């Protein structure tokens, strides 16, 4: 068994014309994923120098949905792109330094781009499935590697720009940049490969988006979730270890503003003026659903302890081992009239898996930050 050479690959389908077009689509997916991923990362920061808007209430729902759709669609595109350019791996390195340097930059950028892209897409897919067989922080790693991948992509484009430009402006069957021995006809045409790439990307995206389309959720192989009242559940009360405390008659919601504090039972909250907000809840994994939430407006609770408008609020949960159990709600969200400490969902008492006895629901906020099983609301200075 011998190591293949570039001449071992003779299919004319492995061409610059095909690689450039698939690469363009892949670059668009990466660009959309990067832009929307930065929005999601920023939305999860406790410190937001420029707070995100509360309206429209579905903005995060759209941006995070686009993030996962773009990442999912990129998976088959990346695999097809790698198949097309695979012969380049065995291309001999030029001996002259002037020729070897661009080749080294090209191969180095490709190595970094391919490895980081595979890690990004694989871990992103596993995040959608909520399976974490690693010991590192997904959010921090996903964020850092995004810049590495984009940097490598920009270097790769800079090195290959003349060929990319010629390939995209020419006909797909143009052989100007084909390898000399790439003359064997494939089972399909080059246009057939592009149709396969586009169809595969759309199919992969649909397998995800089906989870957000009423009536076809059963085929959403990439985003299965337990559902109650049509709202998916990422973490149950049992897995969070809060069943006993959340269902106890001794439960109290603590409100704190400086030296002023107040403890309210769930019965106290039920006795207050109830408001209704129809709001989506959208998760970082990309799923989203809309529910009718009913409860006490957060601004009304803040008034009880004399908190002035324009203050950030810290929300704490009964659960203690989750990164989202202690989060900061920016002032514009805390003061928004649609932000509730919800007691009901879709006309029924909030189930314990949805955050009973009380949970936060706010417009245009990541689902992971819509704290369940709230135990303490603290007004920050």
Image (cartoon, helix red, strand yellow):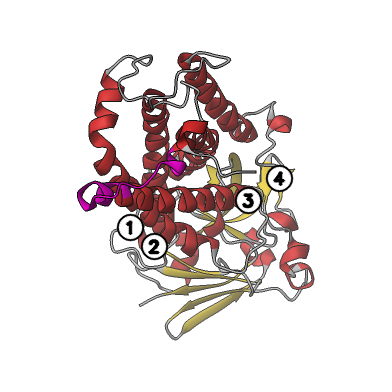
Q: Give the range drawn in magenta.
A: 88-103
Q: At which x and y percent is residue 309? A: 34, 64
Task: State the CA–CA distance, disc 4 to disc 2.
Answer: 29 Å
- Packing grade of label 3 (10 A; few <14, some 14-19, many >=20) is some
Quarter where residue 230 is shown: top right
Residue bearing the label numbered 4: 225
- Packing grade of label 4 (10 A; few <14, some 14-19, many >=20) is some
> Is residue 190 shown above or below 35?
above
> Is residue 248 shown above or below 212?
below
Q: Earlier in the sequence, mark 1 or mark 3?
A: 1
Q: Which of marks 4 and 2 is nearer the N terminus?
A: 4
Q: Are marks 4 and 3 in contact (CB under 8 Å)?
A: no
Assign the N terminus to one quadrant of the image.
Answer: top right
- Residue lying at 25% horizontally and 52% vertically, measured from the top left: 101
> Is residue 116 shown above or below 48?
above
Which numbered disc covers residue 88?
none
Task: State the CA–CA distance, disc 2 to disc 3.
Answer: 30 Å
Q: Do the residues labelled 4 and 1 touch (CB within 8 Å)?
A: no
Q: As drawn, which residue projects farthest toward the left?
A: 98
Q: What element carries label 4?
A: loop
Q: What element carries label 2?
A: loop
């Amino acid at each position: 068994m011998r190591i293949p050479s570039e001449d071992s690959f003779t299919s004319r389908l492995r061409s610059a014309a095909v690689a450039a077009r698939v690469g363009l689509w892949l670059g668009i997916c990466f660009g959309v994923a990067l832009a929307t991923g930065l929005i999601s990362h920023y939305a999860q920061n406790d410190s937001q120098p420029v707070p995100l808007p509360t309206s429209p209430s579905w903005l995060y729902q759209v941006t995070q949905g686009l993030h996962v759709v773009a990442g999912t669609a990129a998976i088959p595109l990346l695999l097809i792109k790698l198949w097309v350019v695979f012969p380049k791996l065995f291309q001999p390195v030029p001996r002259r330094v002037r020729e070897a340097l661009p080749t080294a930059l090209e191969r180095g950028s490709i190595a970094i781009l391919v490895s980081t892209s595979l890690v990004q897409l694989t871990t992103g897919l596993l995040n959608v499935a909520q399976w974490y067989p690693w010991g590192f922080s997904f959010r921090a790693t996903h964020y850092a590697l995004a810049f590495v991948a984009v940097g490598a992509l920009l270097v790769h484009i800079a090195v290959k720009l003349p060929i990319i430009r010629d390939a995209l402006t020419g006909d797909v069957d143009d052989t100007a940049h084909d390898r000399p021995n790439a003359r064997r006809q494939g089972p399909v045409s080059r246009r057939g490969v592009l149709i396969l790439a586009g169809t595969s990307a759309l199919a992969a995206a649909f397998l995800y988006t089906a989870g957000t389309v009423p009536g076809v959720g059963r085929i959403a192989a990439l985003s299965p979730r337990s559902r109650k009242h049509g709202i998916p559940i990422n973490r149950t009360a049992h897995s969070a270890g809060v069943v006993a405390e959340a269902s106890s008659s001794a439960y109290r919601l603590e409100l704190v503003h400086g030296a002023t504090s107040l403890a309210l039972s769930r019965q106290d909250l039920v006795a207050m003026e109830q408001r209704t907000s129809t709001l989506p809840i959208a998760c970082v994994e990309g799923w989203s659903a809309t529910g009718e939430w009913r409860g006490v407006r957060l601004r009304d609770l803040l008034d009880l302890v004399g908190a002035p408008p324009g203050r950030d609020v810290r929300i704490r949960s009964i659960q203690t081992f989750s990164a989202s159990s202690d989060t900061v709600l920016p002032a514009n969200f805390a003061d928004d009239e649609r932000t509730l400490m919800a007691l009901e969902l879709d006309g029924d008492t909030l189930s314990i898996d949805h955050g009973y006895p009380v949970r936060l629901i706010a417009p245009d906020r990541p689902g992971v930050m819509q704290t369940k099983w709230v135990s303490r609301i603290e007004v920050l200075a």
